[in-house]
Amino acid sequence: MLMHVPEQLVIRPPSEAKSLLVRVVRGCHWNRCAFCGIYDLFGVPYSQRSLEEVLKDIDALSERYGDIFTTAFLGDADPLSLDASFLVEVLQHLRLKFPRVKRITSYGRASSLAKKSPEDLSTISRAGLNRVHVGFESGSDQVLRLQKKGTSQRQLIDAGEKVMAAGMELSFYFLLGLGGRDLWKEHVEESVKVLNEVKPHFIRIRRLYIHPLSRLSEKLKNGDFREQTPEGTVVELKYLLDGLDAEGSTFACDHANNYLQVFGRLNAEKGRMLGIIDAFLALPERQRLAHYASIPSVI
Ligand code: SF4
């Protein structure tokens, strides 16, 4: 008899590098963010998977690996758009087959989370989803609109607060450079407002990489978007951190394309982290430029 082969994810957060990866949905049902294009790049159109298929994948993963994982991640882009009852079945089966798993996480769009009732989110949390990774990107309505993110500042706050009230951890991903050279101040200032209000468990920093196949690349060519400079993104990082009052949040530049890898707890370690950024900005220009050139631009 042929062995069932579980499907693989396109991407996962770096913090899930050691996690069991379970695909509950293919691609992204939104797939319109101007800066993204990840699923087009990998040729993965959106489609739902049946519960039967997903449960069979979990069984096959259990047979293949045994009970070796302590963390698991559900993909692709937005499993939280699925019915709570579907997710509960997946989570319960995953917990049954992998009893050593302590943490299960998933990507989730703010718009999908905002549509879920507090009861549904609590049910999903109780069934075993511990953390949601949200591509927050920007708290500025203007930037969110221009980048076609399909969400708003208000929705980001509501979604974030609902996730935390349901007992799950929240990871917000902020994207340096998303406002370009023209909207960078608005991008940072409005993002600070959201982060200070929600105080997510994790504030994770990414730097915009404009992929040649993304819609933003077209805007760049047409002159409709002026890309932030490398130094501009470091200044954004400084202003963002400086504005934060998010007691208890972990601040993490945990991606290879960040120019500075600043990491620490807020608010206690804010001064130390700002000191690292200031020390870098005080280096001679030649050294700073050499550093920018040494960092890869990757998704
Ligand atoms: S950034 Fe996220 S929500 Fe936007 S198109 Fe890409 S995968 Fe979908």
Image: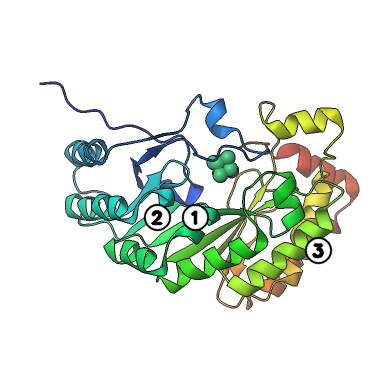
Residue occupying image coordinates x 69% and y 38%: 209
Front tag of 3 and 1: 1
Up the image or down, 92 lies above or below 214; here it is below
Q: Amino acid at mark 3?
A: Asp
Say whether residue 120 is left or right of residue 4. Answer: right
Question: Residue 202 location, x and y as percent?
Answer: 54, 64
Residue nearest the viewer, comparing 245 with 48: 48
- For disc 3, the neighbor class at 10 Å (few under 14, some 14 to 19, many from 20) is some
Residue 190, labelled with which disc? none
Residue 133, labelled with which disc? 1
Residue occupying image coordinates x 52% and y 52%: 109
Q: Earlier in the sequence, mark 1 or mark 2?
A: 2
Quadrant of residue 229 within the rendered picture: top right
Question: Residue 35 location, x and y as percent?
Answer: 67, 39
Quadrant of residue 158 within the rendered picture: bottom right
Residue 115 seen in render = yes
Q: Which residue is mark 2?
A: 105
**Which quadrant does ligand 1 occupy?**
top right
Residue occupying image coordinates x 35% and y 59%: 129
Mark pair 1, 2: CA separation: 7 Å
Mark pair 3, 1: CA separation: 29 Å
Q: Which residue is mark 3?
A: 278
Give the quadrant of the C terminus.
Answer: top right
Residue 18 seen in render = no
Say whether residue 255 is left or right of residue 167. Answer: right
